[in-house]
Image: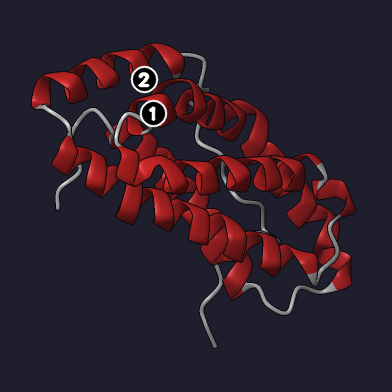
Amino acid sequence: MLRDKSLIPLSHQHQRALALCVRIDRAQPIPEEDLQAWQTEIERHFEPEIRIHFAAEEAEVFPVARKFPELTSLVDELISDHASLREGFLQARRMSVEALPVFAQKLSAHIRKEERQLFERMQELMDPSDLANLGKQLETALAEVAQSCLLPTDVTKLRRKT
């Protein structure tokens, strides 16, 4: 299903986070000497975008989704994921080379759950006017997101899968 335009800003942010996950996956095994660069890369994504993204979902999307009983348990899972992922981002400096791919897998699974389950179902259940209102609320909630492009470093750039 095509993404409703009201949810596209969140989906674009999801794409950028998934790109980080793919780069971490393709960098395996990460040499110990590259660990700090990856820790920094994860930190760089949190403050300008992901912190605000999580807050927008929690303040705007999840309360709307909770209005549909069939989505309540999914929203509870996603809130729990946010808490765990937020802690991971904040503890990035303490991540080991073994913890990095585990973190990336959790982040990727969370994003796919939101995209494939929550957003799809919300689009099916919600009236177009309610989706449009949600889009306006998200626009306001995401206004703080930095509009810069976070470029990977030489160490964290995308590698060919071997």
Q: What colouring style does the render use?
A: secondary structure
- Quarter of the image with the C terminus in it: bottom right
* Amino acid at pointer 1: Val
Task: State the image coordinates of residue 53 (x, y, percent, origin top left).
Answer: 51, 30
Which of disc 1 and disc 2 is earlier in sequence? Answer: 1
Give the side of residue 34 with respect to residue 56, left or right: right
Nearest the camera: 28 or 155? 28
* Amino acid at pointer 2: Leu
- Judging by the rendered image, the residue that carries numbered circle 1 is 61
Point out the residue furthest to the left here.
128
State the SS at label 2.
helix
- Judging by the rendered image, the residue that carries numbered circle 2 is 138
Nearest the camera: 22 or 59? 59
Instruction: Place residue 101 in its image quadrant.
Output: bottom right
Label 2 and label 1: CA atoms lie apart by: 8 Å
Identified at 11% across, 19% down, the residue is 129
For label 2, count other residues whose C-alpha is less than 10 Å away and answer few (under 14), some (14-19) or many (20+).
many
- The image shows a total of numbered marks equal to 2
